[in-house]
């Protein structure tokens, strides 16, 4: 499987947790490309898969983290 741009992976798989093996980063060490290892709607499952793999791994959610119209304070 060939590496893909992280943004393309996010666009293909919406509203799921992604586990990506990062293959290319920018000068600020931000991930640019990688290989999708797993995706699921279950956050706990993706973290289990994370623990089973090695490498430069990225875990992220490919959807909105809060519902539209909701206000969050940090």
Image: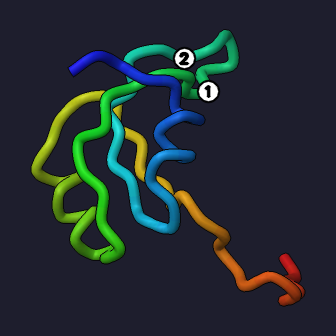
Residue lying furthest front in this view?
12
Could you say which quadrant of the image residue 45 lies in? Answer: bottom left
The kind of secondary structure element at disc 2 is strand
Q: Which mark is residue 58?
A: none
Provide residue 19's location: percent of width, then percent of height. Answer: 33, 48
Q: Verify CB contact (< 8 Å) between mark 1 and mark 2.
A: yes
Residue occupying image coordinates x 73% and y 85%: 67
Pointer 2 residue: 25
Quadrant including the N terminus? top left
* Crowd band around label 2 with a 10 angstrom C-alpha radius: few (<14), some (14–19), many (20+): few
Q: Which mark is residue 30?
A: 1
Q: Reply above or below: 63 against 32.
A: below
Q: Reply above or below: 69 against 16.
A: below
On screen, residue 41 versus residue 32, left or right, reads: left
Please tell me which of labels 1 and 2 falls first in the chain. 2
Provide residue 36's location: percent of width, then percent of height. Answer: 31, 38
On screen, residue 29 versus residue 48, left or right, reads: right
Residue occupying image coordinates x 35% and y 19%: 3
Q: Reply above or below: 62 against 67.
A: above
Residue lying furthest top in this view?
27
Question: How does the figure colour the protein chain or chains?
Answer: rainbow
Mark count: 2
Could you say which quadrant of the image residue 47 lies in? Answer: bottom left
* Crowd band around label 1 with a 10 angstrom C-alpha radius: few (<14), some (14–19), many (20+): few
The kind of secondary structure element at disc 1 is loop
Residue lying furthest bottom in this view?
70
For the residues labelled 1 and 2, the Cα–Cα distance comes to 5 Å
Provide residue 65's location: percent of width, then percent of height. Answer: 65, 73
Residue occupying image coordinates x 27% and y 63%: 46
Q: Reply above or below: 5 against 59.
A: above
Residue occupying image coordinates x 88% and y 82%: 73
């Amino acid at each position: 499987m060939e590496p893909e741009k992280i943004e393309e992976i996010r666009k293909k798989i919406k509203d799921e947790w992604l586990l990506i093996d990062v293959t290319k980063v920018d000068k600020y060490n931000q991930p640019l490309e990688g290989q999708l290892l797993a995706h699921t709607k279950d956050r706990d499952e993706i973290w289990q898969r994370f623990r089973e793999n090695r490498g430069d791994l990225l875990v992220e959610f490919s959807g909105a983290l809060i519902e539209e119209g909701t206000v969050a304070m940090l």
